[in-house]
Image (cartoon, grey):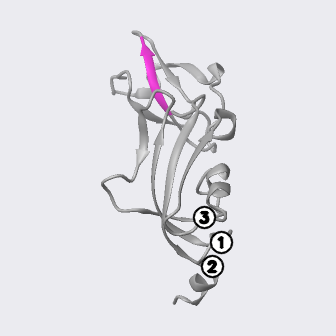
């Protein structure tokens, strides 16, 4: 029976929960997800968890904040002029795309406060500071050498 190695494509079902049981991502009731094991599109601890698994295997893993999306950094909550919003009224919870300087990559942030002249935006990743609990179930494995043979 095939076991998963780096470079293999896996077809999986998964559920990600927070400490309080809140589901933040899941394939439950949807089509399975596909991942290339060892790629940078998934967290390193999830990549490691897949290694050696077989089709039908299920595993639970827990990832500490510093190994996932980092710890919250309160210096990443910024007070900005409403001029950044042009004619739009900032709304608490709204996700906005900001470019601080010309030539720099835009960042996404969540509006967490506002007054008549300013609004506060949190530039931390929404899962920063959170411990992540995943249940992953392998549905199928396509070995890396089989991937290379596909047109």
Q: Mark 2: which secondary structure?
A: helix
Q: In this view, does 109 lie to the left or right of 94?
A: right
Counting residues from the start of the chain, the first of labels 1 and 3 encountered is 1
Counting residues from the start of the chain, the first of labels 2 and 3 encountered is 3
Counting residues from the start of the chain, the first of labels 2 and 1 encountered is 1
> Vertically, is 87 above or below 33?
above
Q: Mark 2 points at which residue?
A: 144
The residue range painted magenta reads 109-114
> Vertically, is 29 above or below 84?
below
The image quadrant where one finds the N terminus is: bottom right
Could you give the CA–CA distance between mark 2 and mark 1, rounded to whole angstroms?
5 Å
Give the residue displayed 44% in from the left and 34% down from the top. 96
Circles 2 and 1 in contact, beta carbons < 8 Å = yes
Q: How crowded is mark 3: few (under 14 residues within 10 Å), some or many (20 or more)?
A: some
Work out which residue is located at the far top of the displayed protein and give it: 116
Give the residue displayed 61% in from the left and 52% down from the top. 46
Magenta-colored segment: predominant secondary structure: strand
Q: Residues within 10 Å of mark 2 (few under 14, many from 20)?
A: some
């Amino acid at each position: 029976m095939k076991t998963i190695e780096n470079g293999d494509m896996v077809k999986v079902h998964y559920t990600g929960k927070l400490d309080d049981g809140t589901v933040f991502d899941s394939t439950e009731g949807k089509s399975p997800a596909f991942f290339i094991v060892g790629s940078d599109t998934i967290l390193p601890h999830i990549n490691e968890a897949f290694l050696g698994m077989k089709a039908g295997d299920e595993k639970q893993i827990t990832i500490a904040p510093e190994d996932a999306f980092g710890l919250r950094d309160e210096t990443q909550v910024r007070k900005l002029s409403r001029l950044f919003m042009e004619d739009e009224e900032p709304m608490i919870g709204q996700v906005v795309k900001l470019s601080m300087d010309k030539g720099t990559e835009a960042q996404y942030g969540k509006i967490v406060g506002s007054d008549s002249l300013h609004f506060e935006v949190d530039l931390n990743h929404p899962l920063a500071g959170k411990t992540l609990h995943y249940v992953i179930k392998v549905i199928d494995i396509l070995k890396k050498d089989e991937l290379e043979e596909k047109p």
